[in-house]
Image: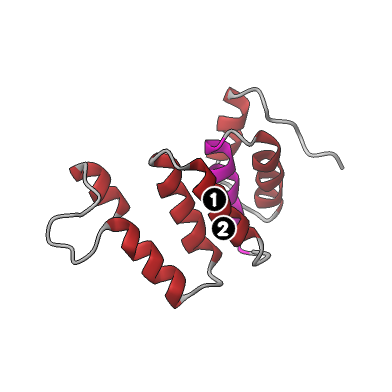
């Protein structure tokens, strides 16, 4: 729904019963402890210039102590989008240590001159 809304440049996609943001609200009420929903919502909020609300969603996602490497990687990307480089780097190391092979987070941190190898 987010991508379709972005493509159509609207918060209410044609044919949808609810605005895009309402789907996040419904998903959070359905699965309040699912960190991925909150990370995706934070992405949406960041793209819509609402960084304070995005941070609150990321903090809620973190409070679930996520262990899924994909969620950890996405937390890193989300914090990078908010220019919170230290947190992004910490999540990048956790994700790569957990077996994530996607280079995107590392490359974006390198482009921002914020990448550092993990200390062993």
Any part of residue 69 in sight: no
Gap in angstroms between the C-alphas marked 2 and 1: 5 Å
Locate the N terminus and report the quarter of the image it occupies.
bottom left
Q: Pointer 1: what residue?
A: 74
104 to the left or right of 21: right
97 to the left or right of 38: right
> Which of the 4 quarters of the picture holds residue 13?
bottom left
Q: Pointer 2: what residue?
A: 71
Q: Secondary structure at mark 1?
A: helix
Residue 15 image point, x, y percent = 12, 61
Marks 2 and 1 close (CB-CB < 8 Å): yes
Q: Say the numbered circle drawn on residue 15.
A: none
Residue 101 image point, x, y percent = 58, 47
Along the viewing direction, whichever of 110 and 50 lies nearer the viewer: 50
The magenta-colored residue range is 68-82
Along the viewing direction, whichever of 54 and 3 lies nearer the viewer: 54
Q: Residues within 10 Å of mark 2 (few under 14, many from 20)?
A: many
Any part of residue 16 in sight: yes
């Amino acid at each position: 729904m987010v991508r379709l809304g972005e493509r159509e440049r609207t918060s209410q996609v044609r044919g949808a019963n609810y605005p895009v943001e309402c789907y996040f609200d419904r998903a959070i009420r359905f699965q309040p402890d699912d960190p991925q929903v909150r990370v995706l919502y934070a992405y949406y909020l960041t793209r819509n210039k609402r960084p304070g609300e995005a941070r609150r969603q990321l903090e809620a996602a973190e409070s679930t102590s996520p262990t899924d490497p994909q969620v950890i990687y996405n937390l890193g990307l989300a914090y990078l989008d908010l220019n919170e480089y230290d947190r992004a780097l910490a999540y990048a190391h956790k994700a790569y240590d957990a077996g994530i092979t996607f280079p995107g987070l590392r490359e974006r941190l390198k482009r921002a001159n914020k990448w550092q190898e993990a200390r062993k």
